[in-house]
Image (spheres, rainbow, N blue to C red):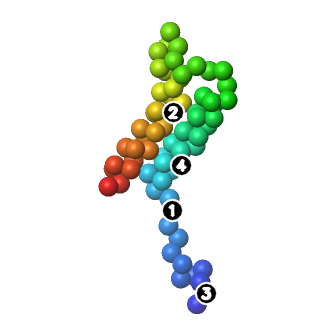
Amino acid sequence: MSRLSTARLVAPSFTQYAAAIALCWLLVGAFALTLTPLPARTAGAGWSPLFWLVLAPACTLAGLRLRRG
C-alpha cells in the first residue's frame, strides 16, 4: 500500500476557517492602522477604527480559543 492511500485526509473545520480569516483580518488591520494616517480614535466614531481593525478580530480569536478549551 502506498502512503497516500493510508493517509487520512481531514477537511478543515469551520473553526479553523474562522481562525484563519480572523488572523488575516487582524494582520491587515494592524498594518492599516500603523502605516496609514488613520487615527485610532475619532470624534465622530469614537474608538471605531481601532475596534474594527484590531480588537474585533482579536476578540474573535480569543473566543475561538476559549471555545476550543
Who comes first in sequence, dot 1 or dot 3? 3
Who comes first in sequence, dot 4 or dot 1? 1
Query: What distance separates the C-alpha of mark 4 from that of mark 3?
Result: 31 Å
Which residue is drawn at the image coordinates 53% and 82% (left, top)?
Answer: 6
Q: Is residue 30 above or below residue 62?
A: above
Neighbor class of circle 3 (other Cα within 10 Å; few <14, some 14-19, many 20+) is few
Marker disc for residue 20: 4
- The residue that mark 1 highlights is 11
Query: What distance separates the C-alpha of mark 1 from that of mark 2?
Result: 29 Å
- The residue that mark 3 highlights is 2
Who comes first in sequence, dot 1 or dot 2? 1
Who comes first in sequence, dot 4 or dot 3? 3
Q: Is residue 28 above or below residue 16?
A: above
- The residue that mark 2 highlights is 54
**Callout 1 amino acid:** Ala
Neighbor class of circle 4 (other Cα within 10 Å; few <14, some 14-19, many 20+) is few
Q: Position of residue 26 (x, y in %)?
A: 54, 39
